[in-house]
Image (spheres, helix red, strand yellow):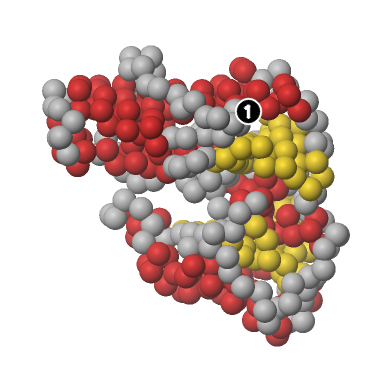
Amino acid sequence: MKILGIESSADETSAAVVEDGHRLLSNVVATSLDLHTFYGGIVPEIAARSHIESIIPVIEEALKTAKTDWAGIDAIAVTKGPGLMGSLLVGVLTARTLAITKDKPLYGVNHVEAHVYANFLTDTKLPGYQLAIKQPKFPVLALIVSGGHTQLVLFKNHGDYQLLGQTRDDAVGEAYDKVAKLLGLPYPGGPSVAVAARHGNPRSIVLPKAKMSSKYDFSFSGLKTAVLRAAQELAGKDYTFPSSGLSKALSKAQKADLAASFQYTAIETLVNALAGAAEEFEPGSVVMAGGVAANLDLRKKAEETLPTPVIYPDIKLCTDNAAMIAALAYYRSATQPADEPYRLGVFPSLSM
């Protein structure tokens, strides 16, 4: 079964063809990241216009790379949420139109859940991909970490999962972005902070870890504020000094120490929760997913802490992509009916 996946929840326009839920035939991504860098974050209107310009060429390229045409496509999958309203609308309306005109079943899927399914891709002839040798074994414990989401989820089977915990405020990726902005580092913050952290001392500044009533919930707003206060102190300023002026008041070495200390604390928070859940639930596999899962320090810490190997997607499949959308739709199609193409809507605040 070949499924064409479409992803447009944020600033990446992506289309991919996946066969039988594990064989990656194509994965095309057009990003508007450069258009947002100046603003230090995604501008919804710019992202939506970029999707409109890119989505048809991206779909055509995905079919071409997969060496197939519409006759070879068995179904269409699309992100229905969560995400930016305008961006989601472009993807869903395109998928609906194609499902109607090409007479294909349509599956709207949850973007956050789909991140986990990047780990179910195990076979490809495409160059430059390093996929897992075998698929995760249920029950699967998943840490989903991105700019908008930080969740710890136990999958008992396809479509059968339990949300163990999630962030109560900022997602970890959002915290990375805000710390990067404070330090004057370029957007997106995850890679920028990780690079700066390599030149700093992660134990130079002691930062607090949030204590939550639920042991698997997360909070990163306090950590973000603690970085601000530490930066003000290092710069010789009081708490009234604006964050916008700190990047000029700090030395390169001070920025590196702040980045390293923040990353050290954020990663310890994530891995400690993951290790605790792994010990309690004894899963068949442990996986990471989402953009922050590309962080090499996070991967290293998880490997050092957990007694069992941790499965990660290829770096290119950590950020938003349509391959994960198509992969999830394959397993969903086995147990659930297709969506009505005239009625499928978008759900910007969709939760798991």
Q: Residue furthest toward the bottom?
A: 101
Task: Determine the residue positioned at 64% across, 44% down.
Answer: 129
Residue 161, position as x, y percentages in the image: 75, 45
Task: Residue at 74% x, 72% y: name it.
Answer: 339
On the image, the x and y values in percent for residue 330 come to 79, 58
Does any portion of residue 148 appear in the rendered image?
Answer: yes
- Residue that protrudes farthest toward the front in the picture: 213
Residue 126 location (% of width, % of height): 67, 51
Which residue is drawn at the image coordinates 79% and 63% (left, top)? 2
Local SS, label 1? helix
The spot of residue 155 in percent (x, y) is: 75, 41
| Towards the viewer: 315 or 284 | 284
For the residue pair 252 and 346, the one nearer the viewer reads as 346
Q: Residue at x 77, y 81 (%)?
A: 103
- Residue type, label 1: Leu
Q: Residue 26 is drawn in which quadrant?
A: bottom right
Q: Is residue 108 above or below residue 343?
A: above
Residues packed near mark 1 inside 10 Å, few (<14), some (14 to 19) or many (20 plus): many
Left or right of 192? Residue 183 is left
Quarter of the image where one finds residue 299? top right
Q: Which residue is mark 1?
A: 274
Q: Quadrant of residue 80?
A: bottom right
In the rendered view, does 30 fall on the left or right side of 184?
right
Q: Quadrant of the N terminus?
A: bottom right
Residue 26 makes an appearance in the image: no
Q: Is residue 162 left or right of residue 143?
A: right
Q: Nearer the viewer, residue 58 or 95?
A: 95
